[in-house]
Amino acid sequence: MKLRFAAVLLLPCGLAHAEPRLTQNDFGGVGLLQTPTARMSPAGELSVNANRTDPYSRYSFVLQPFDWLEGAFRYTAITNRRYGPESLSGSQSYKDKAVDLKLRLWQESYWAPDVALGFRDVGGTGLFSSEFLVASKRYDDFDFSAGIAWGYLGNRGDFENPAGWVDDRFKTRPDLKGTGDVNTSAYFRGRPSFFGGVSYQTPWDRLSLKLEYEGNDYKNEPKDNLIKQDSPINLGAVFKVTDSLDFNAAWERGNTAMFGLTFHTNFASRKAPAKTYDPPAEPLPARAPAIAMDQVNWPDVSRRLQENAGYKVERISQRGSELIVYGEQGKYFYSPKAVGRASRILDNSVNQDIDWFTLVNKRYDLPLEETSVPRQTFREVLNNQEPLQALHRTTEINPAMPHNEKTLYTEARDPLSYGAGLGFKQNVGGPDGFLYQFSLDLDAEYRFNRNTWWSGLLSTNLLNNFDNFKYDGPSGLPRVRTDLRKYLTTSEVTMPLFQFNHAEQLDKDLYGMVYGGYLESMFAGVGGEVLFRPAVQRWSIGADLNYVRQRDFDQGFGLRDYSVVTGHITGYTDLPFDTLAAVSVGRYLAGDWGTTVDLSREFSNGVRFGAWATVTTASSADYGEGSFDKGLYLSIPFDELMSVSTMRRANLVWSPLTRDGGAKLNRSFQLHSMTDSRDNDMFYRNFGKITE
């Protein structure tokens, strides 16, 4: 996983919660201490938790993609148990990874409580697996919860399983093998227990108190841990240090202290930092310049469009009273902001014969969409003579089409671009502990013409502890991903990318691309992709086909013997609640065939929470621990984190295990993301930025 430096910083921001405050439990997720509640954070919430309750150290990332769905990824260090033999992992403690889910079934009303159904450790080893049904009801400053749990949370086994009356198999819970499967065969089986508690918001708004009764008696702990419980009653407190930082403390089991920290922010409601390093938008003139169109200083207009509005101009044309700018907008994540700034520049530059400004956005010469702004209405809105809604109604977004027009100016191409940034890689949860690397990344791009280009990336190690990386996971498949250690430790200087590309618009809604070279850190080869994406439609379909060979471990120009043909047919569709579904069917890098389902929620600011699962023809034995590929991810526009506008993203991925089954080629350029601006929902959701 690689991300720019700004992506690893969670900047504090204000967030107002309803009272009593919603706080995290020890495992991660809204709750009391050891137990969950039915409460949910607001959609868009991200929480990062760390706490210690001997012998467990827990670290969790909790995402709230919807008001009714909570997902968590957790690392647990069992510090009094070693990962394995000293020859394998030295003195490294055992690490467990898990994925949790909680769904709200019923929302609180005057008489009825919140009700939620939850699953712990559904995608990990199953050491802490549990299922629960819980209800929560608020009364003034008190929030009461009560529930029933199976598995780890209900290990006391207070009563017979009611489902046993239907089927005897529900009376006993099978032992889990620690395979990382979803463990559906164990769901709601065995003797359950009650749990519950109350949180109290004190008159001091920084302090909340918690009391709970837990259903675990600690007599069946993972790894045969002998843990003494003097009392099932736990007491705790949460102190709000800042709006984004909580300090947690508790007395649990009647004999053990817990301390923890929670960092949290809400990407749906938070305000991005002010763009203090952006150039100010040009002010509008009192009146349009009285200058003939053939006397306009078009090179200066082109320069200002790039520096102030982010448009790398290809050409500028006129059709009647419409001025058309063709170019690639590469600076502003919010396209209305770029369109508004470009309209100001054009209004400052051309005479009153022009009534419309049209910006045709391209990506590697692929015409995507054209946005037309009525000049007079735009001026009236900026001068507070008309409401923003008037401009919203009259601004047009259409598929980019050829026009009969007069070319006024053509910009000479600047073929070479380059940059530098800080890279970060991490690997955690294996017998080698937490591994990291900071690197200096140099990237460059050379355009032979507007739709044929070369891209390269050179990465130089700055700081790492990969000398502790000694473990290769077992696999019954070709080692297409589990040789990760060798790729990370063989060379101080690597070349993750060295790729040639050519893209074309094949028809009005059909795009194509061919590419070849060193496509990612582990594979080189050639391939092609096509995408059918109708304008203003909420679906698209694409296909890619690739022949690739495995690269040498030093990530230079050398190749290894293993080769494979891989590719997928992928359908994309928008679902309700701003959800995107992507379903891929095809052949993976290890030669296995299967399907990947990816579901994600994108907020109006572009932040995306998502999850995926892949099932292939690889048997569980060949795949190894985990049985199939799955994980959670968070994609954050750098624009949300920085004081300068940018279109870059940070992608954070949490996967329980690295395995060879279900592994896809990690291509840097994909037509679906390259043509994202054909979906105009994002434009209209952020239309107000056209005046910034």
Image (cartoon, helix red, strand yellow):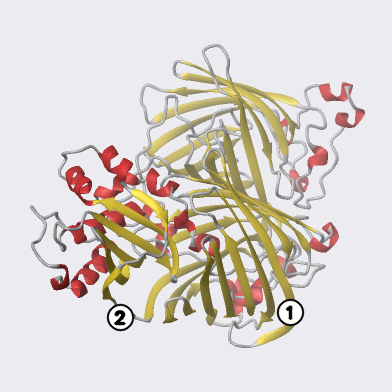
Q: Residue 563 carries which label?
A: 1
* Image coords of residue 585 (percent x, y): 72, 58
Secondary structure of the residue carrying tag 1 is strand
* Image coords of residue 528 (percent x, y): 62, 73
* Image coords of residue 661 (percent x, y): 75, 63
* Image coords of residue 320 (percent x, y): 25, 60
* Label located before the other in sequence (1 or 2): 2
Image quadrant where one finds the N terminus: bottom right
Residue 487, picture quadrant: bottom right
Q: Nearer the viewer, residue 482 or 309?
A: 309
* Residue at the farthest right position: 168
* Residue at the farthest bottom position: 558
Residue 303, picture quadrant: bottom left
* Amino acid at the residue labelled 2: Ala
Secondary structure of the residue carrying tag 2 is loop
Q: Distance between the residues labelled 1 and 2?
A: 42 Å
- Rendered view: 581 above or below 431: above
Query: Residue beneath label 2, please?
Result: 412
Q: Report the residue at 54% width, 80% height from top.
A: 499
Would you call the spot at circle 1 few (<14 residues within 10 Å), some (14-19), or many (20 or more)? some
Q: Nearer the viewer, residue 630 or 433?
A: 630
- Rendered view: 160 above or below 42: above
Can see residue 436?
no
Q: Residue 352 carries which label?
A: none
- Rendered view: 491 above or below 182: below
Closest to the camera, between mark 1 and mark 2, is 2
Q: Which of 481 and 227 is in front in this view?
A: 481
* Residue at the farthest top position: 111
Residue 353, picture quadrant: bottom left
Can see residue 382?
yes
Q: Report the residue at 84% width, 36% height from top.
A: 173
* Amino acid at the residue labelled 1: Ser
